[in-house]
Amino acid sequence: MTDTVDIDELRKLFLFERLTDEQLTKLATSGRMTTAEQDEDVVCQGEPADCFVVLMEGEVQMISETVSAGTVAMPRTSQPGVYGGATSAYLGDRAPQTYQHTLRATAPSRLFVLPAKKFAYIVTEWFPMAMHLLDGLQSGGRMQREMIDRRQRLTALGTITAGLTHELNNPAAAAVRAVSELRSLVRSSRVELAQLAENGIPPERLRALIEMQEACMEAVGKLPSRSPLEISDAEDELGDALDELGVEDAWDLAPALVNAGFGTEHLDKVRREAGAEHAPAALRWLSEAVEISQMLNEVTEATERITTLIRSAKEYSQMDRAPFQVLDLHGLLDSTIAIFRGKLPPGITVVTDYDRTLPPVPCYGGELNQVWTNLIHNALDAMDDEGTLTIRTAYDEDEAIVEIGDTGHGVPEEIKDRIFEPFFTTKSVGQGTGLGLDISYRIVAGRHGGEIKVRSVPGETWFEVRLPLREANGGRSASA
């Protein structure tokens, strides 16, 4: 229901009290009056923002659906002149294209409705200085937010890179050390083999030694575990036996041979296969062969560790992949955890509790990794180098659920509703930008149509991320 607009009624409102009769007439002819019944929504959050609405009489309430705090309802008001709807239409294409809130009549009400384009024109033409100030405030705040956003990303990248570099350095150094020792051992092994040949060892006996060498190398790292005391006793026993045979450096050779399962009972076999006169040289050669095998195992383990770290870094950054894909969340979580390994304090325990029946999720993998990074980083900060970080997954009908929990000091109840606000931080000056959770919120809610929320008591805090298992455009189920 609509009726004509009375300029004298408009003049009574604080919004329009300083306008001239000509301006009021222009305003009246550009808009219209409408009525709303009790509990009727005048504008609805998420619908196209095409109207600016002003209360003339009655009562209204502004309601916003948020991820962090659920439904947030402002106090009801009957103050004539309160407004809602497309309040930023003067920004043109930079204005939100949908309503950011719902305006609900909580009593029979009458309202003045102005098309968003007319409202934008009036603000621009009648109040150019105010429009420029508001525009500058809006764009300046957005630019500052984007700059800090980029800085946050670079800071996170630097932190992750430092941790990854530290993690890569350990296996790389181990591989370099092992290769250096391998050069010396291979050279010495050649000399020992040449010495056996010069001493006239028959070919058939040399072949038997080579077979024994292969057996020793195969045994390295595959023997049943023994206590340090048992290993020490075995080395002492073998060292004495080698010394009795006249083997030089017997005590240096014993540890490598024991590591290959070599005992005193094997000495008779060596004497029998190589001959008593060749036994000492044969034992030295066997010992060096075992050490070569150990060094090769170390190089293999180190390079595999490097490969695993690089694979994790690649998975984390989602290199060589399309931005939007159907992905396994567990792979994304594991790659993020691997990136953090280098910076986890000794007192932090990481526990994963994955529901392996969770189907793949349509998502932007690289962006979700940034969410996990922000949440894990905050959890580590909250625990002060000691506690348990828990990451678990589940799914509920058409939603995937990822929960990241910590045993830190918790989020105070009075700030729980604000932690997803941009620039809000509980950290000291210089320690946080206040954008980590805001970025996470925008990635989860804005980019994926999901939600992120927090529940916390002292000693237990959980951030819960819910992601749809179907694409936002109504595509097929990720589990199909």
Image: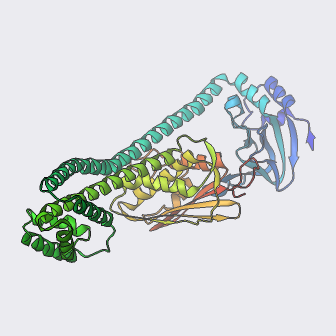
| Residue 458 in view of the camera | no
Q: Residue at x 55, y 53 (%)?
A: 418
Q: Residue 131 in the image: x percent, y percent?
A: 65, 27
In the shown orientation, is residue 449 left or right of residue 355? Answer: right
Quarter residue 51 falls in = top right
Colour pattern of the rendering: rainbow
* Residue 24 appears anywhere in the view: yes
Please give left or right for residue 229 compared with residue 37 in the image. left
Residue closer to the observer: 106 or 476: 476
Q: Position of residue 357 (x, y in %)?
A: 62, 65
Residue 352: percent from the left, percent from the top? 49, 65
The quadrant the N terminus occupies is top right
Judging depth in this view, the residue of 183 and 320 nearest the camera is: 183
Which residue does the image show at 10% across and 65% down from the upper left? 277
Residue 442, x across and y down, in percent: 60, 46
Viewer-proximal residue, 88 or 127? 88
Q: Nearer the viewer, residue 345 or 469?
A: 469
Say whether residue 226 is left or right of residue 360.
Answer: left
How many numbered discs?
0
Quadrant of the rendering where the C terminus is positioned: bottom right
**Quadrant hosting residue 80:** top right
Vertical comparison of 5 with 475: above or below: above
